[in-house]
Amino acid sequence: MAGNRSNQRNRFIVFILATAVTALALYLLLNFDQQLRDYLSAWLTSPAQDSLIRIARLILWSVLAFLGVRALNTVLFDFVFRIRRGYEAPALVRNIFSMVAFTILFLLIFNRIYTEVNLGALFTTSAIFGVIIGLALQDTLGNFFAGISLHADRPFQVGDVITVGQQKHTGVVESINWRAIKIRTFQNHIALVSNSIAAKEAIEVCSRDNLNARLIYFSTVYTDSPAKTIHVVREGVRDADNVSEKITPIVRIRNLGESSIDWEIKYWLEDYAKYNDTDALVRQRAWYALRRSGLSFAFPTRTLHVERKVATRPTTAEDEIADRLSAVDVFAPLTPDELRQLSTATVGHVFAPGETLIRAGDEGSSMFVVHNGKVAVQVADTSGPRTVAVLSEGNFFGEMALFTGEPRTANVVALEETEVLEIGHAAMKHLFETNPSLAESISWTIAERQAALAASAEQAAPNSLAESAGLLASIKRFFSLR
Ligand code: CMP
């Protein structure tokens, strides 16, 4: 931005200087005509002096006309057009304006200086001149008129993604001028497609103000349930960055292949120019979603040779889980035996960075322990989500809804790839029955977190002691404990 400003200032200074120098030279030429002729008479004859002075006048007036046209162009298009229409004038319109205005001014100046030349006759009689110009400018004129028709049609605008030309150049349109369309490809190369070629070829336009869709393919094994796959993948990809919320992604069977069910995900993008990144994110989300649900991608070789049920806990050994649970402060009173029992009852899930594990307002019947990675606990604020806590390995969350039966109080979002251990209602009930003190220590954590949430919402913080006593009673009721 700053560079742009200083560039504009430099151009303005050069413009003022050039105008001043030309105007001064013209003033001197017109007012000191006799002195100049006297000076030149030492070397040149009178007709030669005359033609030299006329050429100098033609040049100086033309330069002044050129500068005048540029100034008018800037005033008309940079200020009036942009302010009135709210967008930048197309380069082609600006160029045509400058060319026509300058040609008219030049002819007028020429006519004033060379009064004896009949320009009309020169143009009408000079057929050869016309043929030469026509032949020499054949391509250029073709581009020029194709450019005009592209502008008149307006099939696409600067910022749209288009695919054009025999080589199928795809990229974002950067400019359209009198000769070519300039496209920035996704490898950050510039492709110039001449207007005449673009006018002849089919152009695929993904306009900026259109909801453009993409298709992503994947395959699963035949033993996986299609209904489950549809649900799991759709929910996994719908809140990925740049996936439009206006239309829910569609997950559908594309083909029943030899060794796999072949699927496609159709999703719509907010910003189509970022489709490469978003495709990759959607594939990543599909991977995590399938993995968490115990569904499997199909690989012909593997599907042929391996016939093994997908483990519910794909990455973590039982002892490792028992170790992790023993490091959770509220589980400290549990015996090694109880910890092992608890670890067999947990289910591991892996989440991608940015994925939402828990949504505020949802119902919840399980809690989670962070096994690897980090999550943020976020509450909605007027200015967007606000993080109230970051939880890492050994921390737990989701206990509030599980123990109170209330809806989830906050969003929990993965900050990096995160593996969590899910503990359900039944496993906790069993633990409460054998460890009455457990309900008490958990009710303390809940009371503290509720106080923190209330403080962050600037509500009066509940009295932790009274709150935790109330919670304990409601946990006992909820789990039918004595
Ligand atoms: P739950 O309400 O089931 O779902 C959202 C979870 O975020 C909640 O349980 C708590 O586990 C967690 N949570 C809410 N507030 C805080 C906080 N202030 N500090 C840490 N964790 C919290």
Image (cartoon, rainbow, N blue to C red):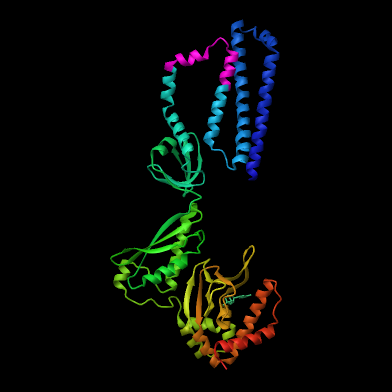
Range drawn in magenta: 105-128
Out of 3 and 147, give the one closest to the viewer.
Answer: 147
Residue 45 seen in render: no
Which quadrant of the figure has residue 26? top right
Q: Classify residue 12 as left or right of residue 340.
A: right
Residue 339 screen position, x and y as percent: 51, 87
Work out which quarter of the rendered image holds the N terminus and state it: top right
Q: Is residue 335 magenta?
A: no
The answer to whether residue 71 is above or below residue 205 is above
Q: Position of residue 467 (x, y in %)?
A: 67, 84
Residue 112 within the segment the image draws in magenta:
yes
Answer above or below: position of 407 versus 2.
Answer: below
Q: Decide if residue 283 is on the left or right side of residue 449.
A: left
Q: Nearer the viewer, residue 24 or 482?
A: 482
Residue 289 sits in quarter: bottom left
Q: Is residue 110 visible?
A: yes
